[in-house]
Image (spheres, rainbow, N blue to C red):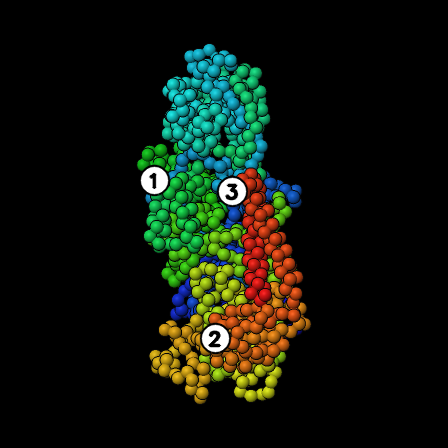
Amino acid sequence: MIEKNYQPADIEDRMSVIWEDSRAFNAGRPDRRDAEPFTIVIPPPNVTGSLHMGHALNNTLQDILCRFERMRGRDVLWQPGTDHAGIATQMVVERQLMERQQPGRRALGRDKFLDRIWEWKAESGGVIINQLKRLGASCDWSRERFTMDEGLSRAVVKVFVELYRQGLIYKDKRLVNWDPKLLTAISDLEVQQIELKGSLWYLRYPLEGKAFNPGDPTTFIVVATTRPETMLGDTAVAVHPDDERYRHLVGKHVILPLVGRRIPIVADEYSDPEKGSGAVKVTPAHDFNDFEIGRRHNLLQVSVLNQEGALALVGNEDYLRGLPEGAMQFAEEFQGVDRFAARRQIVARMEDFGFLEKIEPNTHMVPHGDRSGAVIEPYLTDQWYVDAKTLARPAVAAVRSGATTFVPKNWEKTYFDWMENIQPWCISRQLWWGHQIPAWYGPDGKVFVAETEEEAISHALGYYVEQEVITPEQGREMALDRNKRAGFITRDEDVLDTWFSSALWPFSTLGWPDDDTDLKRYYPTDVLVTGFDIIFFWVARMMMMGLHFMKEVPFPTVYIHALVRDEKGAKMSKSKGNVIDPLHLIDEFGADALRFTLAAMAAQGRDIKLAASRVEGYRNFATKLWNACRFAEMNACTVPADFDPTKATQTLNRWIAHETVRAAREVTEAIEAYRFNDAAGAIYRFVWNVYCDWYLELAKPVLMGEEGAARVETRAMVAWARDEILKLLHPFMPFITEELWGVTARRDVLLALAPWPRKAATFTPEQLALMATTVPNDPMMPPPLVALETGEFTDPEAEAEIGWVVDLVTAIRSVRAEMNIAPATLTPLVLSGASAKTRERASRWSDVIGRMARLADISFADHPPEGSVQLLVRGEVAALPLKGLIDFSAEKARLDKEAAKADADIKRIDAKLANEKFVANAPEEIVEEEREKREAALARRAKILEAMERLKSAT
């Protein structure tokens, strides 16, 4: 029996246990062994993570697809797992050690520190998995993987070694995003650009061969910079080749102030004549753009900072090369000075010597580490790289050929822009937690890359015997005795970028390279659901690795969902205090309400503006469904075993069968096209408007009337349509639907495994032929059943009749609301020039129409009476005589006032949006809010004008 009140918390835990105990979500179930597989891999959340609204949206959409396909009979594998999250996890454990006043990472040593991380994972690493279960994620939890587990680690090592042997992984000295606090390279995704108010310093660089005179511009060239501390590493000055001011100086040299280094003036299109002085200092070792200029002009790379972001000049051969006597004194004076302190001191020194021309305020973006908060330093260092350009070619071709498509399609342009301008991928990180790079160094620094240390030592010993560094006898002894070879080769201490292991996720989770049983069945996956921010970092890299190692794209479709913002359209952030916690919403309104909200708002290409009030609204929708099912139960509505909805004889019941099939088609087609909002909208309208507001209301007189065939059939149809609703809603609201499915009748199958409503009834050719020849007017036959070519059930006669009743009542209610007619006031209805069919319908449904539309009576006339509002309902006129019921003059005055207010609102908003300063400077969400207000005002005005026209026709 259904409880009186809907309480989500009472249901959700119980349903989760039922699903888990029955292994409902396990891939490869015996009953699905021969079914077509459907595979999705979860974007693995960080093991340190907690469920945020992005996770909630992403996993809700994946779950809709998985539950939908599971109900369609497919063998669904939704592969779950978590990412080891190198930096994040290492920081969590280091912070924990510090808070507990225990020895730190360095004091513990690598092995003991890693043991502590594994202990932390065992205790706290499953938080987000349990939170995903609370959301209702129907993953095959028996297959949960972790990017550092044994099998995935073997895959990572194998991929690294094979790519290295193919020349696609190599070591190089390049600029990286360096975090001077965490002391590691980080990816672009871990860099946060923050707008800061700073300065633009204009510095005078003396021209070679001219006596420097601050008052004589012919003796120097002015460069503008936001980072004067890096001038110590300058190796050129760049000007635009078309800049007439400096064309005569190209090829000449300047003498670097304070340092004395002779550096060239080069022509390069990177320099912007309109920005600053038009001349820029070039520091290839401390700026990404300068690094490329340096490569184009074969410039020296002089690094002047150490890993902590302090000046490192003493003993720096690159810095000291070619400098005049006395340079060492300056180097010693500034050695070890922090970069920001050095900035102040260098500017002061430049000013003392007349090299500072001016300082201008300058607001610009400064990169910060998203975890450390430190200003990121472009830093020249030896790192491991993947030749991404080579791997990207097949991945670009796959999308161009349509082997993989993006939904929405506009994201393909983003993909191409990134992939066709791809740079080498830095894959090494200076951390301890992660996949340690499988590379070992010999005594002379030679690199040996191998899958195991034993393999590496074998290669090393063979190489050094061949080079006669050791004798064959020494080689044999070292191969046999670990003690004798101890320290002969040392392993690279760095670990791999987390995205490296994530790039293998679609096939490493399926057993590669150890076992290909699941790989053959579930690879490639069917679709990837993810956010736009990781198209390059994850999607593109999975494409590259999948094509290279599997020779097949990892997924034919990539669905890119939008951002979840706050209700005003602002991006959520802790600093703004506008972060909405999905777990709080689940606690307050239930997981089903949150899921349905996210699905209903997930329009392709449009960000979601989330408000708690929307979630509350869909909680009310769940309550509406709950109460409808209780109504069915209280009226003894059940589905007989032999019930066939297509054999119904009552027009109302044939209408709901028709509408149910139509709703199933709309929901199915929308999910198949990844139009989640349309699917949610279709089932919402069907449940609330069609089933609850119309069908159950129209069925009440039958259900409460005398026992007979009509009542028996209506009970069965109420229950049948309810069951179809539960099926259609299940992917969106799994908890409440599974509960109601189990409570309303004894079931031999869980709803999660029940068959999806068929868009089409299965008719034989003979049945279709019989239907086509049925005589519509035969009184002994039920109203005609029409089958489309697909065999889909439809009954246009039933739809025409009940649809007319619905449209008529709706139109009358709308006019009553527009004209402010009190609910207690009953109005007459005149059907003008009504056809015989309409007269029959009006006669059959007069009691219902009168009750629902608040009518005094229904009559017929050739022409609408004077003083009546005319409604066009399905091509025929219905008139409401309002003369004497309302004050036409007062109503006109009210509508005029409302129209004037709407016009004023539109004018005010238009003026604001026409203000270029407002549009340029106001936050994006404020501008969008004004546009939405304008749309609402326009819609309001349109309704007012429509009401005015109706009033005009009545007078």
- Give the crowd class for mark 1: few <14, some 14-19, many >=20 residues within 10 Å: some
Q: What's under tag 3, amino acid-wise?
A: Glu
Residue 363 or residue 773, whichever sits in front: 773
Q: What's under tag 1, amino acid-wise?
A: Gly
Q: Tell me the mark number nearer the camera, choosing from 3 and 2.
A: 2
Q: Mark 3 points at which residue?
A: 190
Q: Mark 1 points at which residue?
A: 462
Residue 680 or residue 181, whichever sits in front: 680
For the point 62% across and 70% down, which residue is it? 882
Label 2 sits on a secondary structure element that is helix
First reached walking from the N terminus: tag 3 or tag 2 = 3
Q: Mark 2 points at which residue?
A: 800
Q: As displayed, is residue 8 above or below residue 300?
A: below
Q: Is residue 946 toward the left or the right of residue 770 in the image?
A: right
Provide residue 802's location: percent of width, then percent of height.
Answer: 51, 76
- Give the crowd class for mark 2: few <14, some 14-19, many >=20 residues within 10 Å: some
Provide residue 841's location: percent of width, then percent of height.
Answer: 52, 79
